[in-house]
Image (cartoon, grey):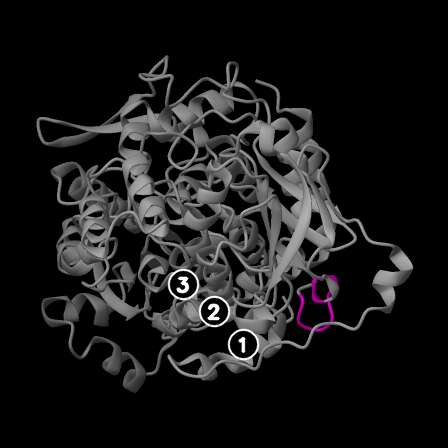
């Protein structure tokens, strides 16, 4: 199938814009391969430190003739998504020995959960945890002991952070190894119903906790299609998983065999393997476009409007929201996974999942098939489903038709023709809106503004009945430089209640919304942010705002001269406690949301 002209044009645009930075990146990884630190160049004292505690693998690692896989793990046993990783390293060492290789845990990275910190002070560390993870990954791989890397991570900032860090060692092959989603629990629609009843004071905390614990009930990622599961989708369309690994449940034999296959493959594609495939060549402009196409086609998380530009920068590639917007106009929405539909990722997987998704997008010219993947030279390898045949891992072609068209459709018969993630522009700056979960009758909202500098003040105004009207809720001073750009998902139940009462409601913010947020139109990530006298700092209560997601416009309907003369609001003082003061240097150095909101990348000149 011929590549879709819009996909081809956006790719060409990115290639042209990135020519100098991509060339510099490729020169870096060539230098690291040829003249950088590697195990064979280590002095005896350095090398001895590296294998001192390696037990039965000591002779092999010392000899330098076998592939040594560096494991970077995001394991902790407090978070359901990362708890399964606890036993992975010991299993992976056994798998490596099966093919004459070795494996060592190179290091660990933090893995925080926005679900635990949502609406709390810890959420202000969330975005910057991505940079911390990237830095931790770089520290882990800096020892020069490894010929390939296994990256164990799955949730929101963890996968982007692992990739950004590993890309600084892009001469090393790497495979992302997921752990899978938990089995389905309480239906998401019922969970949302209980949350809204709690927001209205109609049920108590005990009923709310019962509902939440029935939803989040075992090991594995949450089953809604938020940032974590969007991560796994992107790794598949970028060719960085073993094919079909994304949504196999933890604790199953199939999951274990996919991990074994990943370790075996790392021995083949590693430094001295028969099929060398460095990460820095796997992640190129086409792979980044594939990630964006997959995000749009499946209705993925808006958080990747920040993470994808940051990952791309790590590989010397410049990707912006206009690229995303142009792709959105051409890429159809083919999946309805909660919050864009009623079913969860387990039902999406059962309907055909990533194999069917990739097959139909390739068939319609919407994905680049000709990319270097960890599995082969073509993305077609990912249009397959893994299964066990008498205990042996095999792959079958994707189903010819979706097994459930309420969940997953062919690209030729989509749920809607647009990918549903659009660039908004106007006199308040640039932002992003996700329309795929919003009823089309609410894509255009015009109403007076109610302005807040703190999300808790929104909750207090809601409880006081002050928002019971058509309203555009503006929550500012929530950008990267102000307070670390926390998610504002805590507002979703209250705004949902107002919308269900018949009011025309929208949110405008320089902060983020959760990948699980949906039905209320939300203009988010606005840049320039309010801190530093961005336009949002001059919005006042009662100003009329028009949000038009159909045309990609957000406009403050105030006389231009009057607006220019207004004094900007005074920003809140930086908050202390919960470690937030330790991240002050990241806030001060962060660049804009469209560039990824990163002090680390800005400081490195990337």
Compare residues 95 and 387 and report the one nearer the observer: 387
Marks 3, 1: nearer the viewer: 3
Q: SS at mark 2? A: helix
**Residue 320, visible in the rendered structure:** no
- Dot 1 corresponds to which residue? 586
Give the residue at x 22% y 72%. 62
Q: Earlier in the sequence, mark 2 or mark 1?
A: 2
The answer to whether marks 2 and 1 mark residues whose Cβ atoms lie closer than 8 Å is yes
The quarter in which the C terminus is drawn is bottom right
User: In x, y percent, where is residue 413?
Assistant: 50, 14
Give the magenta range: 530-537
Magenta highlight on residue 534: yes
Between the residue at mark 2 and the residue at mark 1, the CA separation in whole angstroms equals 7 Å
Q: SS at mark 3? A: loop
- Dot 2 corresponds to which residue? 128
The answer to whether marks 3 and 1 mark residues whose Cβ atoms lie closer than 8 Å is no
Q: Seen in the image, is 270 located left or right of residue 573?
A: left
Q: Sort mark 1 into few (<14), some (14-19) or many (20+) by Cα contacts within 10 Å.
A: many
User: In x, y percent, where is residue 338?
Assistant: 37, 35
In which quarter of the view is residue 399 placed?
A: top left
Compare residues 602 and 275 and report the one nearer the observer: 602
Magenta highlight on residue 73: no
- Dot 3 corresponds to which residue? 119
Give the residue at x 39% y 74%. 139
């Amino acid at each position: 199938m011929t590549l879709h002209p819009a996909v081809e044009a956006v790719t060409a645009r990115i290639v042209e814009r990135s020519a100098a930075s991509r060339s510099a990146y490729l020169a870096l990884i060539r230098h690291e391969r040829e003249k950088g630190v590697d195990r064979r160049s280590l002095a005896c004292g350095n090398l001895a430190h590296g294998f001192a505690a390696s037990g039965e693998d000591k002779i092999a690692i010392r000899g330098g003739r076998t592939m040594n896989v560096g494991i970077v793990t995001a394991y902790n046993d407090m978070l359901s998504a990362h708890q399964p990783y606890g036993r992975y390293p010991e299993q992976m060492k056994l798998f490596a020995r099966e093919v004459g290789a070795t494996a060592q845990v190179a290091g660990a990275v933090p893995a925080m959960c926005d679900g635990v910190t949502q609406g709390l002070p810890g959420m202000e560390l969330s975005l910057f945890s991505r940079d911390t993870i990237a830095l931790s990954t770089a520290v882990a791989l800096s020892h020069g002991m490894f010929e390939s890397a296994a990256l164990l991570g799955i949730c929101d900032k963890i996968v982007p952070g692992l990739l950004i860090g590993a890309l600084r060692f892009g001469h090393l092959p790497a495979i992302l190894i997921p752990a899978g989603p938990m089995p389905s629990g309480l239906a998401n629609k019922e969970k949302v119903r209980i949350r809204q009843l709690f927001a209205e004071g109609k049920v108590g905390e005990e009923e709310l906790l019962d509902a939440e614990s029935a939803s989040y009930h075992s090991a594995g990622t949450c089953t809604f299609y938020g940032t974590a599961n969007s991560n796994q989708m992107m790794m598949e369309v970028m060719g960085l998983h073993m094919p079909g690994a994304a949504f196999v449940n933890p604790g199953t034999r199939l999951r274990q065999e996919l991990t074994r296959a990943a370790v075996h493959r790392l021995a083949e594609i590693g430094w001295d393997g028969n099929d060398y495939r460095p990460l820095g060549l796997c992640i190129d402009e086409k792979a980044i476009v594939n990630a964006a196409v997959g995000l749009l086609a499946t209705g993925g998380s808006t958080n990747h409007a920040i993470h994808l530009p940051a990952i791309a920068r790590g590989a010397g590639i410049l990707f912006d929201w206009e690229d995303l917007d142009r792709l959105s106009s051409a890429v159809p929405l083919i999946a309805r996974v909660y919050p864009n539909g009623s079913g969860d990722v387990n039902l999406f997987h059962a309907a055909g999942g990533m194999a069917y998704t990739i097959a139909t997008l390739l068939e319609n010219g919407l994905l680049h098939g000709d990319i270097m993947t960890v599995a082969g030279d073509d993305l077609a390898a990912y249009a397959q489903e893994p299964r066990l045949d008498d205990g042996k891992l095999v792959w079958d072609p994707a189903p010819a038709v979706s097994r459930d068209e309420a969940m997953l459709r062919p690209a030729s018969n989509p749920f809607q023709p647009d990918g549903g993630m659009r660039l908004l522009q106007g006199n308040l700056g640039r932002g992003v809106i996700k329309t795929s979960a919003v009823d089309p009758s609410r894509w255009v909202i015009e109403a007076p503004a109610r302005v807040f500098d703190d999300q808790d003040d929104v909750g207090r105004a809601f409880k006081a009945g002050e928002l019971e009207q058509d309203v555009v809720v503006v929550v500012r001073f929530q950008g990267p430089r102000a307070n670390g750009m926390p998610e504002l998902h805590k507002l979703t139940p209250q705004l949902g209640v107002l919308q269900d009462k018949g009011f025309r409601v929208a949110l405008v913010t320089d902060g983020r919304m959760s990948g699980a947020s949906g039905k209320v139109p939300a203009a988010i990530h606005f840049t320039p942010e309010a801190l530093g006298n961005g336009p949002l700092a001059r919005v006042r209560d009662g100003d009329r705002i028009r949000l038009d997601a159909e045309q990609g416009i957000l406009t403050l309907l105030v006389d231009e001269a009057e607006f220019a003369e207004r004094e900007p609001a005074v920003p809140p003082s930086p908050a202390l406690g919960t470690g937030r003061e330790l991240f002050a240097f990241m806030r001060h150095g962060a660049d804009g949301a469209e560039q990824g909101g990163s002090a680390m990348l800005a400081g490195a000149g990337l």
